[in-house]
Image (cartoon, grey):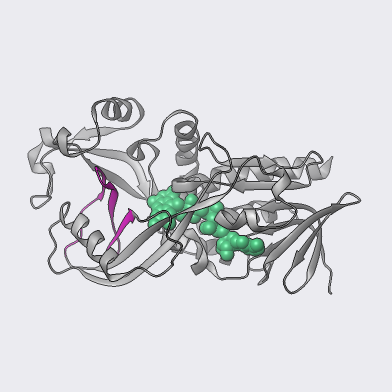
Amino acid sequence: MPTTTHDLIIIGGGIAGRFCAWNATNRGLRTLLLDPDDARASAAWASGGMLAPVAEGLTGGLLEIGLAARAAWPDAIRRLQQQSATPLTLDHGIVVPLAPETSRAPMAGYLEQMRARADIVMLGDEPDALPAQAGFERAALVRDEFVVAPRAVLAALAQATADSVEVVRDKAEQIRVVSGAVHVEGTAAAYTGRSVVVCAGHRAGLIRGLEPFLPGTVTGERGALLYVRSDNRPPWTIFDHGLTGVTYLVPTDDGYRIGATADPEDRCRTVRPEEIDLLLSRAASLWHDPGAEVVEAVAGARPVGPLTTGEPLVGPLDPDRRIWGLLGMHRNGILFSPFLADKLIEKVAVCLSS
Ligand SMILES: Cc1cc2nc3c(=O)[nH]c(=O)nc-3n(C[C@H](O)[C@H](O)[C@H](O)COP(=O)(O)OP(=O)(O)OC[C@H]3O[C@@H](n4cnc5c(N)ncnc54)[C@H](O)[C@@H]3O)c2cc1C
């Protein structure tokens, strides 16, 4: 089997792996990225792209990470645009419907928290500011939260690292640390590096040799997303904490994305017709658009665990600091990735240079 030697082997080319690779190569680390699939297999491909820790209602440690990550995005986008020559935008403004209390999750504490953490305008107090045909009477506009197009970000990361990161279409089957080096056995070849970063999303637990270093299990929570073509786009992202779950509408160039949580037990990447109907009906309760045309339906698995706190696991996994992980970013992996990947790779680089 062919063997290659790198400073860093990154397992998984989703948003976490791609941001790690970008940071690693910017720090001069010789980097290899392994993934058996293209970006379409990653959760980011099915993601809404909201960078909205406050509108999401994050609390505690997740909120702290989310606020720091939100602050890191504008600079990440600026640098990524420069390096990839790809136009990227951060769209501001997320509308959160708030009333009536009886039909939505309890909102009082949530609203207080939003006010303390973000620039909020109460749209119910300014009726003219609400889109006339919106299906709610009272809402908060969170002005300083963003949305990105995750597929464009993945493409820009691939472009920015095209000449500096070696990308191999292979699946990591096993990790072993031998004599201070990391050996990754893939399906097609074996690879040797000084360190490895595991960014394999909800499949991380399937890599042999890694499990003893994980503090808990890694699973996936399925979510589904529709791409809709329409002349009647909402003017802002609408993000609803409904009783039956979260639903959001994100404007795009030619319509909008509709996202929601689907059955967590389901592993299927195909979105069934009844799911599409459900998503459309939940979206219709927020935005009246009889002409909406579904052009794509896609499902992905948000990585859950391995920490019971619900926070992502980011840092060294083994005592010798050869195996590192960025895992369990769950609902907020797009938001968290640039910030956490930067912090993680900074530590890996220090460790490699010492
Ligand atoms: C419907 C939906 C909507 C979402 N909306 C948002 C949102 O609005 N905002 C937000 O911040 N987050 C959102 N998320 C969550 C976000 O998409 C995820 O948290 C994030 O994409 C996880 O990234 P990851 O790189 O850790 O994992 P993944 O994206 O799952 O990537 C893992 C990669 O590892 C590869 N891999 C797996 N096993 C191996 C192996 N053994 N060897 C090599 N490669 C391997 C896979 O092929 C994959 O490419 C959403 C998710 C879904 C599903």
Relative horizontal placement of residue 48, taking residue 194 as reference (left or right): left
**What residue is at 10 percent from the left and 41 percent from the top?**
137
Relative horizontal placement of residue 350, taking residue 73 as reference (left or right): right
**What residue is at 55 percent from the left and 46 percent from the top?**
328
Residue 335: image x %, image y %? 46, 46
State the residue lying farthest toward the front. Answer: 265
Asked if residue 261 can be seen in this view, the reply is yes
Asked if residue 254 can be seen in this view, the reply is no
Q: How many marks?
A: 0
Place residue 99 in its image quadrant: top left
Q: Quadrant of the C terminus?
A: top right
Q: Quadrant of the N terminus?
A: bottom right
Residue 341: image x %, image y %? 60, 47
Q: Is 275 drawn above or below residue 19 in the view shown?
A: below
Residue 44: image x %, image y %? 47, 59
- Secondary structure predominantly adopted by residues drawn in magenta: strand
Where does the magenta region start and end?
232-260
Place residue 111 in its image quadrant: top left
**What residue is at 16 percent from the left and 39 percent from the top?**
103
248 falls in the magenta region: yes
Residue 95: image x %, image y %? 24, 44
Place residue 279 in its image quadrant: bottom left
337 falls in the magenta region: no
Q: Which of the two residues, 286 or 244, is positioned nearer the viewer here?
A: 244
